[in-house]
Amino acid sequence: MTDTTVTRDDEASRYEIRVDGALAGFAEFDLRPGAIRFTHTEIDPAFQGQGLAGILAKNALTDAAATGDAIVPLCPYIAKYLETHEIPGAEIRWPGRRES
């Protein structure tokens, strides 16, 4: 059984996913007043095909929503994840979309 963890590294401005201690991928973010902008998500090729990107996105977005900051999905993967998954308590600010 593998040990998979997701942690937030504020110094590197990213959430990291590790498998048995090895860095398997990350989701970069940019903090702005009242918002967290997700800019890029990447899974190491050696770890692809294991569903890690989804685990990373779910954990990172759930943590970000808990801060009360709005989530701005600039990263295509994060945007697609948010279109197909519910994140309880998340306020999403879609780039380029006007609020009505």
Image (spheres, rainbow, N blue to C red):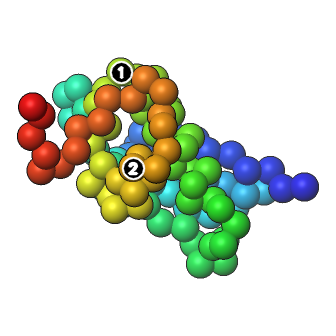
Q: Residue at x 35, y 21 (%)?
A: 68
Relative to the observer, which residue lies in front, 37 or 9? 37
Give the label, 2 or 1, closer to the camera: 2
Q: Quadrant of the N terminus?
A: bottom right
Q: Quadrant of the C terminus?
A: top left
* Image position, residue 48 (x, y; %): 63, 73
Q: Quadrant of residue 33?
A: top left
User: Does residue 31 appear anywhere in the picture?
Assistant: no
Q: Amino acid at mark 2?
A: Glu
The tag earlier along the polypeptide, 2 or 1, is 1
Q: Is residue 82 above or below residue 1?
A: above
The residue tagged 2 is 83
Question: Regarding mark 1 in the picture, which secondary structure is present there?
Answer: loop
In the image, is 16 to the left or to the right of 11? right
Q: Is residue 95 above or below residue 19?
A: above
Question: Which label belongs to residue 84?
Answer: none
Q: Amino acid at mark 1?
A: Gly
The residue tagged 1 is 68
Q: Is residue 100 above or below residue 16?
A: above
In the image, is 78 to the left or to the right of 94? right
Q: Are marks 2 and 1 in contact (CB under 8 Å)?
A: no
Q: Name the residue at the front extreme.
A: 100
* Image position, residue 91 (x, y; %): 32, 29
Q: Residue at x 63, y 59 (%)?
A: 52
Relative to the observer, which residue lies in front, 100 or 46? 100
Q: Name the residue at the right extreme.
A: 1
* Image position, residue 25 (x, y; %): 55, 62
